[in-house]
Amino acid sequence: MPTLISHPAVPLAIVAIAGFRNVSLRLLLAGALFSIIPDADAIGFRFGISYDHLLGHRGFFHSPTFAFLASLIGASAYRQLRSSYWTAFLVLFVAMLTHGILDAATDGGLGIALLSPFSNQRYFLPWQPIAVSPLGLERFFSARGLDVLASELRWVWLPLLSLGLIGILFRHLKMKSQSPKRNRVNARPKRIGIGIE
Ligand SMILES: [Zn+2]
């Protein structure tokens, strides 16, 4: 997996593109949570669930089907998330769906059960530039951990940051192109009524 701090880069990029007018802070935080939930399946190791099991690490809980179902349910809190149902669904779904896809672009582990629960076959993307993160914290705080962070900076944060900046620029330009029109409307002289006083 990329580390837990890198998956929330996706909802952050969504907010940068869509703006806080469309995605509330609460929805952003829920998106960040949804982006890391799939890795809770690593707890299965403690309960003897093997890596290649349907419910094992990178199994069903990393699949698009789980992301779809969890987002359908999660979006029902749309009022608390200060959003519409479908905006909440979309943000939560993309945040969680991309977790499995990013994991499939890592260079280690068993691969992701992208077709689960219909098939437990594990998949990687044809291109796997992201260095896989070690599962143990101890191993993470080592030279390998630094390699992983550098790799995520390059292949996760930089592309998403660029996408987010393009989104901010695009929104800024859009606002600018709309503002003269608004000024023109405001600048229109008020009709002087011919009143009899
Ligand atoms: Zn993962």
Image: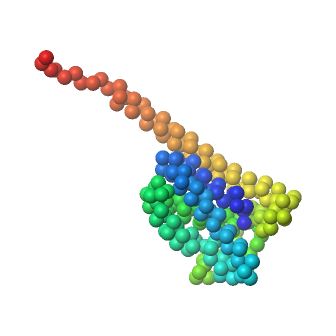
Q: Residue at x 65, y 49 (%)?
A: 161
Pick the front one: 30 or 110: 30
Task: Tell me which corner region of the image, top left, top right, bottom left or bottom right, holds residue 103.
Answer: bottom right
Residue 166, given in percent of the width and then of the height, sits at: 59, 45
Q: Residue at x 49, y 68 (%)?
A: 72
Does residue 34 appear left or right of residue 87 in this picture? right
Task: Tell me which corner region of the image, top left, top right, bottom left or bottom right, holds residue 168.
Answer: top right
Residue 119 visible in the snapshot: yes
Does residue 31 appear left or right of residue 178 in this picture? right
Residue 163, given in percent of the width and then of the height, sits at: 61, 49
Residue 60, given in percent of the width and then of the height, sits at: 62, 77
Residue farthest top in this picture: 197
Does residue 108 appear left or right of residue 64 in this picture? right
Residue 80, given in percent of the width and then of the height, sits at: 48, 57
Q: Residue at x 74, y 56 (%)?
A: 152
Check the image and tell me how it is coloured. rainbow
| Rendered position, 46 above or below 151 | below
Does residue 148 appear left or right of residue 174 in this picture? right
